[in-house]
């Protein structure tokens, strides 16, 4: 009999069946063992066949079949069989009660509990736990008080449930009032503190535990990791004489979630065994950094993939912007959950593919507010406010995020009255609601109203102060912005960057530089604000010094920083330095130059007299030049009195802007100087597409060998 059970647990069903068939006498117990072996491995058809083939059945056989249905997700069949039983015992009732509780069917569980002819400690504990875990804490407490005999298994879930709702004081009260505590009780209190981020209290509980099991050790490793204390987490991990799979997975997750991928890879390689959690952890880690080859390799090497694995693969492609491949994977999924739908719908909506996003959302078995909000925001950002309002009105339910989304849509579009109406109609408001209206008034130039909204806020959090500071800055109220900055009790990177930007925009560059070096949150935005300030005010030497300092401090450059650097080069006439910066974007930093960078280079080359190089760049750049670029080029032609390039540029500019006066004047000048059309440099028609990455690469390579 025992061998049937052992082989069933190991998944050796053929051997389990062979042992069963070899039994000289098969009783109810041996039949139950075979049924459980099939059930444990998801072979429900064979389990039912074994049940039907039993010559006789005792209560254990009936309970085993009900359990088989319940554990394999066939609730209706489990219910039907339970009510067909010729007789039941306490195990039968507890089995059905547990089934309802595990599926969060609280009403059914409560009705069954009330009908039970008898109850034991398991019955009471299961019902109290079900109520507590589903947030019915008052009902759970009432039921706990009604128990004829207090059972620790009923009290422990309350400790966890109160902590999950943020009520650690009540968790601690229940824990302290326990007449006795088991290891499960200690672990419940430890987990309550750990999951709430109260590391110090978690350590105190851990140190006072009379005994510890692997659950306690694993909880402490996870608690240290969640609080960014990787060194302590590693110390606890290495101090253990024995580790189970959960321990290894906890340490692996700690490294992966905190960005220590190489250490995570070493842990993964050293693991004596791995499960789906291990593989999915590595898959998610690679996905978060956008390492598609590593994600693909890990996914292909997995012994088995579940819905979490597929979702991580989709997230990886969405993260790098490859929504086409993400859709291919989505379509290939053996099953899809709400996470997969939500990720793809939101990504499509954010990219502006509203038609595809809406169609996909209509296919969802159950729509959620996340998708609805994403499509609402995308529609609003496209400028179609009437469609955004229609989408908002069609939602069966609206949470605060949705209300804030429609308010923000109106505010950003300058419809301040509609934004105010949305704000006033909200059933509940948060700091974001107030900040949106504050910024909306500021955008419309109504600073008095912005300040009034700030003053009426029930609570001033950091984001509110930052919104007011930004509002003053955008409207040129330097003194008020400085007063707001000085008044703030706490500041973050947004605060410091906002003030540095205000000082730079007002030409107070020495103060901006001083503030930058005093800031505890220096980042690329801080440096770029100062760099742009120096460049736009013509302080080219200081701009180059800041650029050099950024390299020394290993600041990760962004596109805005390079624009500021190119502007400084234009003001200083440093053509070679500008060309080097432009080429360096691609070759050293892996960034594709955008339209602003090309425009700066055309301006820089033209001012320096390299009209042929500027013209070639205009022809080869991956964007269609607009009137601004052609006017810059034409201005350079006038400065250097180049009739050939000027004539071609004027003609192209006239085609784009027939009423343009500058082009007409320049053409008149050319044709009064010479009657020959041979002076005219003919530029080809602009390309049909607005952007081509391959043209971008060739343009940079060509420029690297010029000037």
Image (cartoon, rainbow, N blue to C red):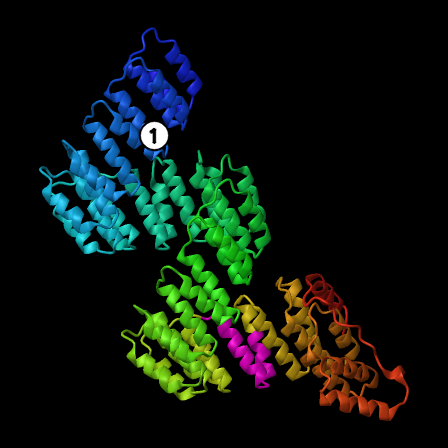
Q: Residue 251: image x %, image y %? A: 40, 44
Residue furthest to the left in view is 148
Which quadrant holds the C terminus?
Answer: bottom right
Q: Is residue 521 magenta?
A: no
**Which residue is at the far top?**
24
Tell whether position 540 is magenta.
Answer: yes
Say what secondary structure mark 1 lies in. Answer: helix
Task: Count how many numbered circles sit on residues in the image.
Answer: 1
Give the residue at x 46% y 79%: 414
Q: Give the image quarter of residue 670.
A: bottom right
Q: Residue at x 49, y 47 (%)?
A: 312
- Side of 315 relative to 451 (left or right): right
Magenta part of the chain: 522-547
Please identify the dominant SS of the magenta region.
helix
For residue 187, say whether it is visible: no
Vertical placement of residue 633 versus 429, above or below: below
Out of 576 and 397, give the one closest to the viewer.
Answer: 397
- Judged left or right of residue 204, residue 552 is right
Residue 298: image location, x then y, percent: 53, 42
Graded by Cα atoms within 10 Å as few (under 14), some (14 to 19) or many (20 or more), the crowding at tag 1 reads many
Regarding residue 431, the answer to whether it shows in the image is yes
Q: Residue at x 55, y 78 (%)?
A: 531
Position of the N terminus by quadrant: top left
- Which residue occupies the foreground of this view, 650 or 497? 650
In the picture, measured across the screen, residue 77 lies left or right of residue 391, that is left
Left or right, residue 249 beside residue 665: left
Residue 635 to residue 247: above or below = below
Q: Position of residue 463 (x, y in %)?
A: 37, 72
Residue sitting at x 84%, y 83%: 644
Where does the image place residue 326, in percent across and percent down from the top left?
56, 50
Q: Which residue was labeled with disc 1?
A: 69
């Amino acid at each position: 009999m025992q061998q049937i059970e052992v082989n069933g647990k190991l998944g050796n069903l053929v051997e389990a069946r062979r042992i069963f068939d070899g039994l000289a006498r098969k009783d109810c117990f041996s039949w139950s063992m075979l049924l459980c072996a099939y059930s444990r491995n998801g072979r429900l058809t064979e389990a039912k066949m074994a049940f039907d083939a039993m010559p006789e059945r005792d209560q254990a056989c009936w309970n085993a079949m009900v359990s088989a249905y319940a554990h394999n997700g066939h609730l209706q069949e489990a219910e039907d069989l339970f009510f067909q039983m010729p007789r039941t015992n306490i195990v039968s009732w507890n089995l059905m009660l547990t089934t309802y509780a595990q599926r969060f069917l609280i009403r059914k569980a409560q009705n069954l509990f009330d009908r039970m002819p008898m109850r034991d400690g398991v019955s009471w504990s299961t019902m109290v736990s079900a109520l507590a875990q589903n947030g019915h804490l008052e009902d759970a407490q009432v039921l706990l008080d009604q128990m004829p005999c207090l059972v620790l298994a009923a009290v422990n879930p309350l400790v966890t449930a109160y902590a999950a709702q943020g009520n650690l004081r009540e968790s601690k009260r229940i824990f302290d009032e326990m007449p006795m505590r088991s290891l499960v009780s200690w672990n419940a209190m430890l987990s309550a503190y750990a999951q709430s981020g109260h590391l110090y209290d978690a350590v105190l509980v851990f140190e006072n535990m009379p005994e510890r099991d692997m659950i306690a050790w694993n909880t402490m490793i996870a608690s240290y990791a969640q609080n960014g204390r990787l060194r302590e987490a590693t110390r606890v991990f290495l101090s253990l004489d024995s580790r189970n799979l959960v321990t290894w997975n906890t340490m692996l997750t700690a490294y992966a979630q905190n960005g220590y991928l190489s250490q995570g890879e070493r842990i993964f390689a050293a693991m004596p065994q791995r499960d789906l959690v291990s593989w999915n952890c590595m898959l998610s880690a690679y996905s978060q950094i956008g390492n598609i080859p590593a994600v693909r390799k890990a996914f292909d090497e997995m012994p088995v993939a579940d819905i979490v694995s597929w979702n991580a693969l989709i997230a990886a492609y969405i993260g790098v912007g490859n929504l086409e491949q993400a859709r291919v994977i989505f379509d290939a999924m053996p099953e899809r959950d709400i996470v997969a739908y939500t990720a793809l719908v939101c990504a499509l909506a954010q990219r502006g593919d509203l038609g595809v996003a809406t169609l996909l959302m209509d296919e969802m078995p159950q729509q959620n507010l996340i998708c609805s909000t994403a499509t609402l925001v995308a529609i609003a950002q496209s400028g179609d406010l009437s469609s955004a309002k229609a989408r908002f009105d069609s939602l069966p339910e609206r949470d605060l995020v949705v209300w804030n989304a429609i308010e923000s849509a109106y505010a950003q579009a300058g419809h301040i009255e509609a934004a105010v109406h949305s704000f006033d109609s909200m059933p509940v408001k948060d700091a974001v609601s107030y900040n949106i209206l504050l910024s909306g008034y500021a955008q419309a130039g109504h600073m008095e109203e912005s300040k009034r909204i700030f003053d009426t806020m029930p609570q001033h959090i950091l984001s509110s102060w930052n919104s007011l500071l930004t509002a003053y800055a955008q409207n040129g109220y330097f003194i008020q912005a400085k007063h707001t900055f000085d008044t703030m009790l706490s500041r973050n990177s947004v605060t410091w960057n906002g003030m540095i930007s205000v000082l730079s925009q007002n030409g107070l560059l020495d103060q901006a530089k001083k503030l930058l070096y005093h800031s505890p949150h220096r980042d690329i935005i801080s440096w770029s604000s100062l760099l742009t300030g120096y460049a736009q005010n013509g302080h080219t030497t200081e701009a180059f010094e800041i650029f050099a300092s950024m390299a020394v401090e290993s600041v990760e450059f962004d596109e805005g920083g390079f624009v500021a650097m190119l502007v400084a080069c234009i003001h200083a006439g440093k053509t070679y330095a500008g060309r080097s910066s432009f080429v360096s974007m691609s070759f050293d930093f892996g960034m594709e130059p955008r339209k602003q960078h090309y425009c700066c280079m055309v301006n820089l080359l033209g001012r320096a007299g390299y009209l042929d190089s500027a013209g070639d760049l205009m022809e080869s750049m991956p964007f269609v030049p607009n009137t601004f670029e052609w006017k810059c080029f034409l201005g350079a032609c006038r400065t250097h009195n180049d009739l050939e390039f000027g004539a071609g540029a004027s003609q192209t500019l006239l085609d784009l802007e027939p009423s343009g006066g500058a082009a007409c004047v320049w053409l008149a000048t050319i044709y009064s100087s010479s009657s020959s059309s041979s002076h005219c440099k003919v530029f080809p028609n602009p390309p049909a597409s607005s952007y081509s990455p391959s043209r971008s690469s060739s343009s940079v390579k060509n420029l690297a060998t010029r000037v």
